[in-house]
Image (cartoon, rainbow, N blue to C red):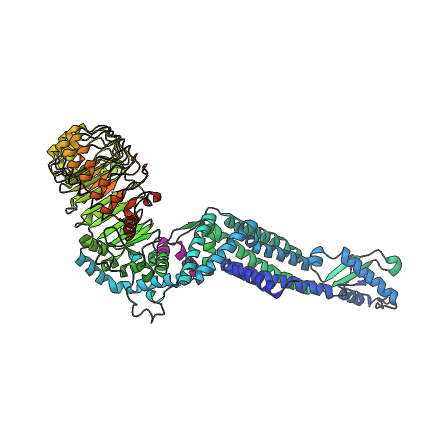
Amino acid sequence: MITLTELKCLADAQSSYHILKPWWDVFWYYITLIMLLVAVLAGALQLTQSRVLCCLPCKVEFDNHCAVPWDILKASVNTSSDPGTPLPLPLRIQNDLHRQQYSYIDAVCYEKQLHWFAKFFPYLVLLHTLIFAACSNFWLHYPSTSSRLEHFVAILHKCFDSPWTTRALSETVAEQSVRPLTLSKSKVLLSSSGCSADVDSNKQSLPYPQPGLESAGIESPTSSVLDKKEGEQAKAIFEKVKRFRMHVEQKDIIYRVYLKQIIVKVILFVLIITYVPYFLTYITLEIDCSVDVQAFTGYKRYQCVYSLAEIFKVLASFYVILVILYGLTSSYSLWWMLRSSLKQYSFEALREKSNYSDIPDVKNDFAFILHLADQYDPLYSKRFSIFLSEVSENKLKQINLNNEWTVEKLKSKLVKNSQDKIELHLFMLNGLPDNVFELTEIEVLSLELIPEVKLPSAVSQLVNLKELHVYHSSLVVDHPALAFLEENLKILRLKFTEMGKVPRWVFHLKNLKELYLSGCVLPEQVSTMQLEGFQDLKNLRTLYLKSSISRIPQVITDLLPSLQKLSLDNEGSKLVVLNNLKKMVNLKSLELISCDLERIPHSIFSLNNLHELNLKENNLKTVEEIISFQHLQNLSCLKLWHNNIAYIPAQIGALSNLEQLSLDHNNIENLPLQLFLCTKLHYLDLSYNHLTFIPEEIQYLSNLQYFAVTNNNIEMLPDGLFQCKKLQCLLLGKNSLMSLSPHVGELSNLTHLELIGNYLETLPPELEGCQSLKRSCLIVEENLLNTLPPPVTERLQTCLDKC
């Protein structure tokens, strides 16, 4: 048994399709309903009549036909002059046998003599009506179309009722209303700021409610604020529209099914209008019927009267008129489908009038059902188009982002980085929340894996912002924001995800001091950077470039002569041409990392102001050129780590000004005694080599503060090592030490000691003399701590400061 709830759901499902029914479809419905009434009325009359035919015997024949009453009267007048001619006697039913005989005759005449059209007229009308009704609804229930149409109607209703749709259309009307008032003022502001007048009108915003909008019945954009739930609902609609468009736009099944049903209607109309008027003449009131029952009744011919003839003629004529109206409407709908370009729907007019100029045209079935919806109400298509626009989607994302990332939540993300600067790191968001600009204490803004980031003019509120990191994100900067960054930004770090050039807005940062560029930048793009771009970065002092190039770009060596630090990470690709390095006479720090260098480039020896040289992760096997470094009087830091160097040449002793030397991660087996002539060394790293001993002459490095020989094969430490009284960090882990000299207690400045990974059995109690050494900075096995006297252990445990 069907419940009322199920009936209501069925009715609601049927009524939901009214959006896709144009006026002619509604007109068809009413005509079909009237046709159904005609069929019901005709059928009821036919069923309620006990005797459809009433037949009487024909006693007088006239011209081989049964004479009608007036023919009989005429014949009687003619024969009245002849007294011998008998007059016909009136018919009288004398008993029940007569009645049964005439009922039999009525039935036989109805079956044999009554025309089939007059007999089955109600059923023909009913059949035609059912076919018309089926054709009208077939496309809505066809297996290949019903699910798509149902999905579309559901989405369309959600789009129409979504608060985001109302807000977006209100913004459009509001901007159109205030545009004439603000145009002249905008031109003045743009001309005074020196910015281009080409402003993206799609991204303008109204900073305050506009007077006059409320009086016009339009809601100001800023007055309608979406809550989090409404924003998430609108976001879900965007996703549904994308999926629906992907599945429907590539096909035209709905269009073809609808076209076929209209063609069937037109063909059916032609057939009906052809045979119904013709057979309408066969509905007659009088029927001449011959029945061979003369042996029983004495008569062979009978005159019958069809009692429904007149009313059936009226109904049939009215039915013909309905069919003509139905056919004309079907012909119009067929003409509309063939004339109009229904396989493409353009929002051109809407794009011109609204601020959503990116609404795409749709095709095939998607376009066709939008054309049908237009016949019902064009407002449906307008409201639906809001969810086809990326600009609209981005605005919604921004609102949802602002609802999610409140000021309090953003404040909890503020940290102090290693440079003791207040940093905000935002990772994998849909955009940049507007509430960020309320945190005026931000000094470093880091944006990572954010697809589309736009810096609006509100960034000028971050008065303390000096450093910007953009990692694997696309950043767009407004003109007012660019003016702020031009004056305030000092450090910029960019990491590219896709191959591309450096954004043009970077070259407007005239006060930029440090620029870090890394990512998949093509070599030809780097080498052909526009000259006028880097030329404007006059204050640039540090440039870090991570790429895969064969030569240092000429634009760097020619247009940045004042550059003081150049860092190039070539990601393992071979750097061939280095001669143009000679032009960079002011360079103080040079890093050539992963450049597949086999020898130290000679062009480096011309950089007289060089203080630091880093040749990490190359393919250096010998460094005989090190003798030429004596000409670099200012060289104080030399990093030759992560190479394949087998030995250190004796000429290293000529580098008397050397203060830092990194030779870790090489293949060095012996240390030349000339190394210890570099008495200014305070940092020496020899980790991850093949050393077996340390010369006693290390005692001459009186300024040594950091000494690392981790992961070697050293079995014994020289006593001279403990004469380096300034030593603060001593890393001896992963060697072959059997014991630790008691002289270690003489290193009173020692703050970090690593001994883990050796063969030590005890620790000397003299460690108590290392007053600056803390437990957390003594890296050793736990069982060795138990070999120390309790006073020493207690002193180490009193402070848990980290190194």
Q: Quadrant of residue 687?
A: top left
Screen quadrant of the N terminus: bottom right
Give the quadrant of residue 71.
bottom right
Q: Is residue 763 magenta?
A: no
* Secondary structure mostly seen in the magenta stretch: helix
Front one among 733 and 571: 733
Q: What residue sits 17% from the left and 50% below the top?
A: 511
Q: Is residue 392 magenta?
A: yes
Task: Decide if residue 186 is in sight here.
Answer: yes
Q: Position of residue 426 (x, y in %)?
A: 32, 53
Of residues 97 and 192, which is closer to you in this image?
Answer: 192
Q: Is residue 27 toward the left or the right of residue 525 in the image?
A: right
Residue 86 vs residue 198, the one in the foreground: 198
- Tell me the magenta residue range: 378-395
Q: Is residue 338 left or right of residue 398?
A: right
Q: Position of residue 470 (x, y in %)?
A: 28, 49
| Residue 372 picture location, percent across and down | 47, 56
State the residue in front, 526 or 448. Answer: 448
Residue 161, position in %: x, y? Answer: 44, 63
Looking at the image, can residue 84 be seen? no
Indicate left or right for 166 with 513 as reference.
Answer: right
| Location of residue 662 by image quarter | top left
